[in-house]
Image: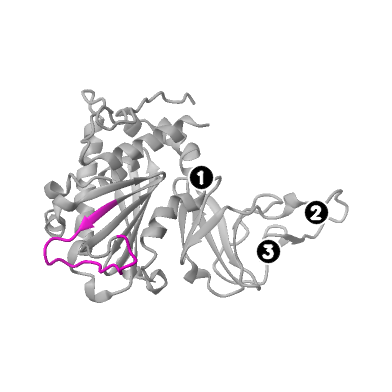
Amino acid sequence: MTTPDWTLSPDVRSASTLPAEFYREARYLELARERVFARCWHFVGDSDRVKVPGHVRPLTLGEGCLDEPIVLARDGEDRLHCLSNVCTHRGNIVVEGEGPASSLRCRYHGRRFGLDGRFLSMPGMEDAVGFPSPADDLPRVPFGSWGKFLFASVRPGFPLYELLREMRSRLAWLPLDALAFEPTLSRDYRVAANWALYCENYLEGLHIPFVHHSLAGALNATEYRTELYPYASLQLGVASTGGEAFDPPPSAPDHGRPIAAYYYWLFPNLMFNFYPWGLSLNVVTPLSVDRTRVSFLCYVGDRRKLEVGAGAGLDRVEREDEAIVEAVQRGVRSRFYARGRYSPRHEAGVHHFHRLLARFLAEP
């Protein structure tokens, strides 16, 4: 596939946005699957789901986009492994259900692996030459963690620590292990728009007073600002007068400031939204060029604060976002629209996202 030649000025004041064809032509999503999503880090759950030695949990990395079968396995030495879930014999899925296991056994021809992925045995291979070899082990999938949160990648284009470094440092004082996943508050949304349009909408606060009237009342617009990092960005939401806010300790960079929310975006499709009640983690997955799944995963620390401040009414905010980005998707199909310009004060995060996208799309 021909690599697009999209020159994006590093100066947001003179730069133009991505061309409209990116949002409407399927070939660019196909390109992004291998050059962006296969090279980035994906959220794969939390360690509470694989807490006990001898427990395995099969997953699909980038379900609907990459569809890469993997398995998390905690061995008898309490070490957590992330492995390919595809048998090295004939390609069958090895682990088909979550639960306790002493080894991993493929039900097709009986090939067995240790919980660390090492080949153990297989019937019928007595006459094979040079067998077994390292190629018979289950491939290890690159993965890492931040607190209880787990991440994996097919072939990472950058280290996980570079993705998480600023967020980890800024929020070192938060009790992440005290946050508990709340399935009743978590759900998937389907959005009739390109995945990148959804991310762009998230990455700027300019639309908040026009689209989110309730959220606008919880935030101090004059204090709202964006900070850029190599593979991430932060939108810092300061509470309006008297609004619900964090109380960062003296050791924290934001001590003395009433922070209503930390909105972290991690390239290309992860959003960590920290509120006084806990964390709303959003995973944006492209299903087609104009269809996106947004998974809202809620981790609660203080239930008493769920319905106050910037972290209240998230379902309503999500639906408002859906409506606007779906309207944008219809608009970018127009023969009269080519590309736009950035607001230098408010859309630095969108510009940063676009430059990263253009860079990764240009790298084979």
Query: Callout 2: 10 Å neighbours few (<14), some, many (20+)?
Result: some
Residue 136 percent location from the top left of the image: 73, 52
Q: Which mark is residue 158?
A: 1
The front one of 331 and 44 is 44
Q: CA distance from mark 3 to mark 1?
A: 33 Å
- Residue 295 found in image quarter: bottom left
Per the image, label 3 sits on a secondary structure element best described as strand
Magenta stretch containing residue 243, yes or no?
Answer: yes
Q: Which residues are magenta?
A: 235-253
Q: Which mark is residue 105?
A: 3
Amino acid type at image mark 3: Arg
Residue 196 percent location from the top left of the image: 33, 41
Per the image, label 1 sits on a secondary structure element best described as loop
- Residue 24 found in image quarter: top left
Q: Which residue is outermost to the front?
A: 250
The front one of 127 and 180 is 180
Dot 2 or dot 1: first in sequence order is 2
Residue 193 seen in the current view = no
Determine the residue positioned at 14% across, 55% down. Answer: 220
